[in-house]
Image (tube, grey):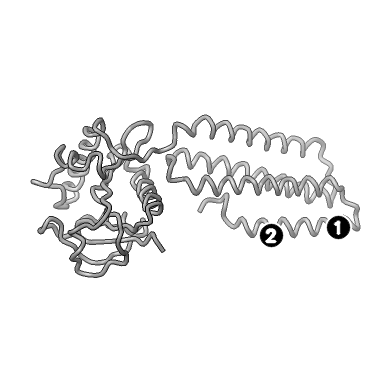
Amino acid sequence: MNSFCKNKKQADYVKLIFLVIMFIFGLSFKASTGDYILLIVLMLIEFAFKIGFKYINSISYTISNKFYKNILNMLNIINFEFEFLFIYIFFDSIFEFNIKYLVGIIFGILVMSIIFFSLFVSLNLKYEVLTFRMANESDRESILEIYLEGAESLKADGVDQWQGRYVPSFKDIDEHLGIDLYVLEYHRKIVSTVCLVEGIDEDYENIKGKWNTSIPYISIHKVATSNKYKKQSFAKKMMSYIENLAKRKRMDLRIDTHKDNKKMRNFIISCGYKYTGEVVLQGELERLAYDKVIVK
């Protein structure tokens, strides 16, 4: 968790204690009423920013990591300015530093930071939002390119998956196009793709183990991300889109992978899925099975 939201509850309690101390000292030293009002206003503005942060955090999977990190960095700077101004006003009300124009300068910097932050978000948001949609005819070549990259990566890792007669082709894509094949777009370029099969998956009916999920469910297949965007967590963001889709449809999620595909196994577990046993695909392909309960 980033520093903007770390221990914020404790920080808020400390500020309230500061206000009480100010009130007590004010009875003795006649602290300015304006200081009380300014501190309360600062707390209210910061509270509004916290609400905004929670909203941004809740939709973080819909924007690029770079944009998200830039937003967090700016929020941390603004938060530091809030904290500094609050502390200075608090101690100034007690010890009467009376440093000319300092509060006005800090407050001016804070206002400029908020304006810059607002402009940055409004100007970049439409370019940095990700789009998760069903694939169409014009996506065929991009999807195949991603699949073939994935097949090469698996081969390099020594994983016998998507190899030989199971190498992805246009035929595989066309079987799912317009039905259950989805893509994730960034800057109008396809960065990830996945098949989401709703209903009963016959290969999942006979499992050496036990599913934690119940019918109906969505089976997740053919997860792949372009090599150009591997380090930008697009696959994980796509999984968040899938979870939200499952929530709307009130369906649980199931997925499988090759036993030697350690990267995918770790990825699945990192997304909150639980190992359930082994399944056999197409009568011959042994796979490790995982699921995630969405409907509770």
Rendered image: mark on residue 25: 1
Horizontal side of residue 39 vs 2, given as left or right: right
Q: Earlier in the sequence, mark 2 or mark 1?
A: 2
The quadrant where residue 134 appears? top left
Residue name at image x 15 percent, y 57 percent: 281
Element under disc 1: helix
Task: Say which amino acid is labelled 1.
Answer: Phe
Task: Give the residue at x 36% y 41%.
Answer: 132
Crowdedness of circle 1 by 10 Å Cα count: few (<14), some, many (20+)?
Answer: some
Residues at marks 2 and 1, CA–CA distance in whole angstroms: 18 Å
Question: Considering depth in this image, is 282 or 269 the residue closer to the camera?
Answer: 282
Q: Is residue 156 above or below residue 251?
A: above
Whether 156 is drawn above or below 270: the answer is above
Query: In this orientation, which residue lies closer to the viewer: 56 or 13?
Result: 56
Q: Quadrant of the C terminus?
A: bottom left
**Disc 2: which residue:** 13
Q: Position of residue 155 (x, y in %)?
A: 16, 47
Q: Residue 233: give x, y in percent of width and height.
A: 37, 45
Reply above or below: 127 against 4.
above
Q: For residue 250, what is the image quadrant? A: bottom left
